[in-house]
Image (cartoon, helix red, strand yellow):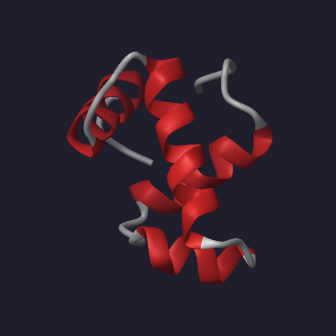
Amino acid sequence: LWPELSIREREIVSLILAGHPTAGIARKLGLAAGTVKNHRRNIYTKLDITTERELFLQYIDATGGGP
């Protein structure tokens, strides 16, 4: 899913989809919150979306609704 994303971006998407907030993702990955925000912005740009909701909808559409 989402081959245009880097490995790190896919890792962050997985954590977003698991419900982790930006600060939690930063702690879990040992990154600054600003770095996670930059990754999120890049992810949204690459996927041509503007919200987390759209990310969830893309995931549901691509997987048929399940993990």
Query: What residue is at 60 percent from the left and 74 percent from the top?
Result: 26
Q: Looking at the image, how many numbered discs can be counted on the residues?
A: 0
Query: Residue 43: percent from the left, percent from the top?
Result: 53, 33
Query: Residue 65: percent from the left, percent from the top?
Result: 29, 38
Q: Is residue 38 above or below residue 16?
A: above
Query: Residue 33: percent from the left, percent from the top?
Result: 55, 70
Where on the picture, by quarter, is residue 6?
top right
Residue 66 as seen in the image, left or right of residue 7? left
Q: Is residue 67 above or below residue 28?
A: above
Residue sitting farthest toward the front? 34
Nearer the observer, 58 or 6 = 6
Query: What residue is at 45 percent from the left and 48 percent from the top?
Result: 67
Residue 14 as seen in the image, left or right of residue 49? right
Q: Is residue 27 above or below residue 59?
A: below
Q: Is residue 34 above or below residue 5?
A: below
Query: Residue 15: percent from the left, percent from the top?
Result: 52, 62
Query: What residue is at 56 percent from the left and 33 percent from the top?
Result: 42
Residue 65 as seen in the image, left or right of residue 10? left
Where on the picture, by quarter, is residue 34?
bottom right
Query: What residue is at 42 percent from the left and 71 percent from the top?
Result: 20
Residue 61 as seen in the image, left or right of residue 1? left
Q: Quadrant of the N terminus?
A: top right
